[in-house]
Image (spheres, rainbow, N blue to C red):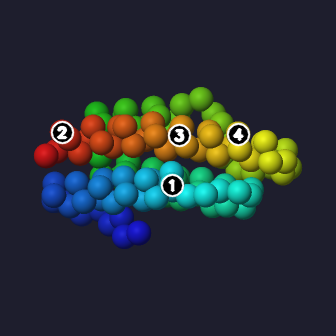
Amino acid sequence: MSLVAVDFPEDHRIVVAEVVVHLQEIDHRRIVDAGQLAEAWMQVHHCDSAALEVMEPSAGQEYRSIVDGPRRRTRPDRSWSSGSSIRAGVAHLRVAVHRRLMVLQSVLNDIT
């Protein structure tokens, strides 16, 4: 993932579009263990950083409110070792990704 920020509006749109594509890829992954879940969350946080770096202040605030929303576990712990706990963690990940995608799609629609 290149996610390079530069000063041109078209390039900001490209970064946001790359983040959207990467988040969609994360959303479609089959996650079956705590390691995969942790890796997916790390990539989501990387996407957050890239998106927030290039967004306009108002869109950035909206995105930040999604990122800083109710605190959920972002790393696996011992309680995620059972299958049902991993499924719950994956469900939280999917909801978080979808909320981010809704804001990013709104940003892309406003840019175009």
Residue that numbered label 1 is attached to = 28
Q: CA distance from mark 2 to mark 4?
A: 34 Å
Figure check: 24 above or below 97: below
The type of residue carrying mark 3 is Ala
Q: Which residue position is annotated with label 2?
A: 110
Kindly state the secondary structure of the residue where label 4 is placed. helix
**Chain-order first, disc 1 or disc 3:** 1
Q: CA distance from mark 3 to mark 4?
A: 12 Å
Q: Residues within 10 Å of mark 1 (few under 14, many from 20)?
A: few
> Which residue does the numbered mark 3 point to in the structure image?
96
Of helix, strand and loop, which one carries label 1? helix
Residue 9, percent from left and from top: 16, 54
**Which of 60 and 73 lies nearest the eye of the viewer?**
73
Amino acid carrying label 4: it is Ala
Q: What numbered label is drawn on residue 102?
A: none
Decide if residue 110 is on the left or right side of residue 82: left
Dot 2 or dot 3: first in sequence order is: 3
Q: Nearer the viewer, mark 1 or mark 3?
A: 1
| In this rendering, position of residue 7 left or right of residue 91 | left
Q: Amino acid at mark 1?
A: His
- Quadrant in the picture for residue 88: top right
Q: Residue at x 55, y 43 (%)?
A: 94
Which mark lies nearer to you, 2 or 1? 1
> Can you say which quadrant of the picture contains the N terminus?
bottom left
Q: Which mark is residue 88?
A: 4
- What secondary structure is marked by label 3? helix
Instruction: Tell me the residue at 84%/51% (across/down).
Output: 81
Residue 37: where, in percent of width, then height? Answer: 66, 55
